[in-house]
Amino acid sequence: MRILIVGNGGREHALLWRLRRDAPEAEFYVTRPNGGMAGLAQPVEIAPTDVEALSGWAAARRIDLAVVGPEAPLAAGLVDRLRVHGVPAFGPTRDAARIEASKAFAKELMRRAGVPTAPFRVFRDADGARAFARELGAPVVVKASGLAAGKGAVVCPTLDEADRAIAEILEEHRFGEAGREVVVEDFMEGEELSVFALTDGEHALLMVPSQDHKRVGEGDTGPNTGGMGAYAPVSLADGALLERVRDQILTPTLAALRDEGSPFRGLLYAGLMLTADGPRVVEFNCRFGDPETQAVLPLTEGPLLPLLRVVAEGGSLAGARLETRQGAALTTVLASEGYPGPYAKGREIHMPDGLLAADDVVVFHAGTTLDDGRLVTSGGRVLAVTGLGATLAEAHRASLRAAEAIEFEGRQFRRDIGWREMARGAGAP
Ligand code: GLY
């Protein structure tokens, strides 16, 4: 079997690691693999968003399954083109990917489907957006509607900050075409939760719920990043809460997408706020989360590959099951000096040999590359170090032990991933 993984970050390394467990005999291919993926898969030197070239290559190579990691190629229609070429592809079509690629589309869809989310309006004119921000009152959230590499949503504690965000997006065109429209919405109070649903467009298999840590500093302080760590499971997300998420959020959203003529087949990621009134959608993503995937996939048990193939080939997940193993996983991201601002590259990484043999640690590469046989940094987020344990505290210790042991100049990481769960006492001892 020939499997193509599109994307080369920590999430895609976790997918490669997980699918190799299911199919050790398969031939794996990865677009521009990072330093950790390079020895495990054959490189494909085509950019993920070069939809024509990549789908043509996959057809010529007779790929049996393409798994698309990042949102940009999904929004660019890679899955549509792969299917035209007869290549089974796991991921939504361009139309279904609008659930992430257009915040305006997603919010209107949720309104029609009665899915709980913050009150909002969509604007193309800055004056209208500013007036609506005043109607809502601070704090308020301003979002560029299109894809903005995780930087397009601004939580504004004051109306002055909302005015600034609206001006940057609509008048100064900070995000280009992605900022042609803004969504202005009410601020929601609570804890965030990430729920991944593997779906055939109708049935949804929920993976273990997780929580990520977007701020660079400990205690969730400082600027936003792509994610400095994640853990799973989250004790707040008990069976009753997940049933509510399924009934009030996932099922009506999937039905609304089918009614639109854009059934969603792939991984639907519901980014939720657990408010005093119950779970509400902050955003939907059309793909696995990063770094949550690096904590969630090690907790999945049983074959995952056949489920991805069913979805990719247009089959049904009715009656299918996805098992979760006991215990916890916690991922600490090692980032480059300066990240999330401008950061250094090319720093040599020293990884103790014993680390890769430890059975309670998995190291996923993100921004790494091989330079003349040396492993060096090449991105802001460099490595995602997942610790496993019977409890979250054990997983935390394993992750930190490994994070401390890996060295490169200027490396930074948070030592407090999972702190909310630990504070609840749920991760002890
Ligand atoms: N962890 C946030 C994201 O993947 O978008």
Image (spheres, rainbow, N blue to C red):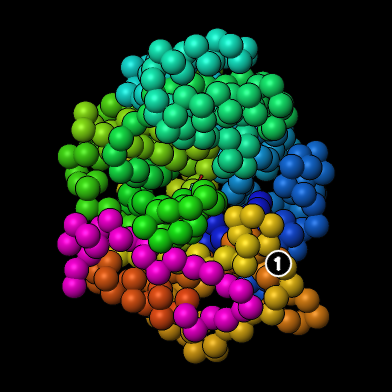
Q: Name the residue under label 1.
A: 344
Q: Position of residue 124 (x, y in %)?
A: 62, 14
Instruction: State the image quarter where residue 423 is shown.
Output: bottom left
Q: In this rendering, is residue 58 above or below 368?
A: above
Q: Position of residue 244 (x, y in %)?
A: 23, 33
Q: What residue appears at the point 77 percent right and 46 percent down from the top-left corner? A: 54
Please give left or right for residue 418 compared with residue 92 in the image: left
Q: Name which residue type carries label 1.
A: Ala
Q: What residue appears at the point 63 percent right and 24 percent down from the top-left corner? A: 167
Q: In this rendering, is residue 186 above or below 87?
A: above
The quadrant of the rendering that contains the C terminus is bottom left
Q: In this rendering, is residue 69 above or below 338?
A: above
Foreground of the two, 159 or 415: 159
Point out the stretch of residues depicted in magenta. Answer: 404-429
Magenta-span inclusion, residue 54 = no
Instruction: State the image quarter where residue 249 is shown.
Output: top left
The quadrant of the rendering that contains the N terminus is bottom right
Q: In this rendering, is residue 54 above or below 356?
A: above
Report how many numbered discs are placed on residues in the image: 1
Please give left or right for residue 248 compared with residue 35 in the image: left
Q: What residue appears at the point 57 percent right and 29 percent down from the top-left corner? A: 165
Q: Can residue 307 be seen in this view?
A: yes
Magenta-span inclusion, residue 408 = yes
Please give left or right for residue 289 compared with residue 376 in the image: left
Q: Where is residue 68 in the image (x, y as percent from the top left)?
A: 61, 47
- Helix, strand or loop status at disc 1: loop
Foreground of the two, 349 or 208: 349
Majority secondary structure of magenta residues: loop
Q: Position of residue 275 (x, y in %)?
A: 26, 34
Foreground of the two, 314 or 156: 156
Q: What residue appears at the point 52 percent right and 30 percent down from the top-left corner? A: 161
Q: Is residue 23 visible?
A: no
